[in-house]
Image (cartoon, rainbow, N blue to C red):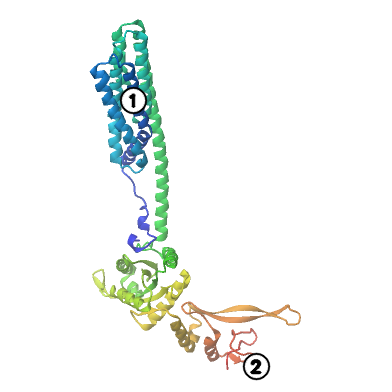
Amino acid sequence: MRMADSDVSPDGFASCGATLPPEAPEAEFKSALMREQYRSLARLGPYVHGVVILATVALCGATARTSSLLDGIVLPAALLAVSMFRLISWLKARAGVERVTLDVARREVGGASVLGPMLAFALSVMAAVSTSRGDNVVEFALALVAVWVAVTACAFCLNALGSAAGVAVAAATAPLIIAFSTRGADLTLWLAALLTVAACFVIRMLGENFRMFAEIVRSRFAIAEKQRAAEDARQAAMTIALTDDLTALPNRRCFQGQLAERIRTGTETARPFAVGLIDLDGFKPINDIHGHPAGDDILRQVAVRLARAMEGRGSAARMGGDEFAILCDGIGARDEAIALGDEIQAIFATPFAVDGLDVALTGACGFALFPACAHEPDELVRLADAALYRAKAIGRGGVAVFDRKAKSDAVGRAAPVVAPRLAAADSKVGVVFQPIVALTTGRISGFESLARWNHSALGQIAPSAFIPAAERIGARVRRRPSDDGPCPARFHASNWTSLDRPA
């Protein structure tokens, strides 16, 4: 089935049996992990830079009298500018986090992995330098510990980056340990040792957090992969169910769904379309003479030509055997349908090449129009089949369009020759039992059998049309004086008498 051929197209379905290379799932997982890292940064990135901004302002306020040009102006200004810029950028990125491309996500994550440790290192250096000139050891220690706690909090906001968060803690810890050690006081030496141990624990915790984060992403990815595989299997099953194995066109079931959908759309938009049935003339001898493989090859070629003819304006389907169907938009008048039939005939102008032979074929076309002929799918197909019946009666390559007047004329023409057709496989007389109610008691006193001729192409034919043929096969006909007009024929089991035909 081709995507251009129909609204219900299995080309949109995943092909059955398609497998990915072994490295593909891992690469897809890394892409999914990268997207989750970007989402985490978009959520928590503003908090990281907010903490850096607050810590920088607090240090500048506490050490304003003792600060130098470097640690009092240059470093704080650089930290504030970078953090403010990134804070605004992440706030803007939140709105389009789901639409961002993988390349952008990779670039942003890579930039944050470098910028995070750099900001932590710069903040620690600024704190160590700006507080080193003070004489109060306790104030010095408290200031550095406060900075380390702030940097550690930022690192936990960056734990989705894996090693980058640990590097940020190490980059923030190293300048502070150096500052504690060079101070030489017992308190600062103990704090340097304590800070070293605490940094190791924090880095280990960040590593565990990242592994948990990655496992959650992997679990979600695995669930999504299973759901996708199940959807692929479902789509493959739909492809098999809706596609003709031989021609790859939509099959009868798919065509019925397309037709119902077209009717719904046509009812809403008042857009007409044509339903066409195409039957190949003289196809059976090809199978008998050249074999079924040759016949199958011809059917495939016919399918390709029909699909190409309907491309962009409708769809083609195989109904079974050598019968095809088409839906063509914008066809609302008889002349348009006839012109469409001529186009269909043109696809048979070029002979079909099979096993080195050129096989000439024609096809009869019958059309029913929506909404002119009917509004129900089954009725449209039945009327198109009736038109196909008339087209085949015209001769090879005939084209016919259904209309009500043609149906009445066909019934009239069928009456003189109906007797031989009563035994045909596609035409039969059915019997319907009707209860007889007594006028005095109001109770059912018996049943009478009513004959109905159900013709597959012409539909239900009135008894007044086929009773003349019944006379020629020996039925005795009489008329009740009380009747004013024609009524259904009654065949009684006792005398096989047809009642109530007009004299």
Q: Is residue 258 left or right of residue 130?
A: right
Image quarter for residue 179? Answer: top left
Q: Extreme right residue here?
A: 441
Q: Position of residue 134 (x, y in %)?
A: 31, 10
User: Three-letter amino acid code at disc 1?
Assistant: Val
Which badge, 1 or 2, comes first in the chain's sequence?
1
> For residue 413, which quarter of the picture?
bottom left
Q: Is residue 276 visible?
A: yes
Disc 2 target residue: 481
Q: Residue 331: x and y, percent?
A: 36, 73
- Please state if 360 lies on the left or on the right of 407 as rendered: left
Horizontal side of 297 relative to 496 (left or right) equals: left
Which element is circle 1 on? helix
Find residue 52 and name its label. Answer: 1
In the image, residue 173 above or below residue 307: above
**For the point 44% across and 75% down, which residue is it?**
373
Q: Residue at x 30, y 34 (%)?
A: 109
Relative vertical location of residue 230 with respect to residue 162 in this rendering, above or below: below
Circle 1 crowding by C-alpha within 10 Å: few under 14, some 14–19, many from 20: many
Secondary structure of the residue carrying numbered label 2: loop
* Amino acid tagged 2: Pro
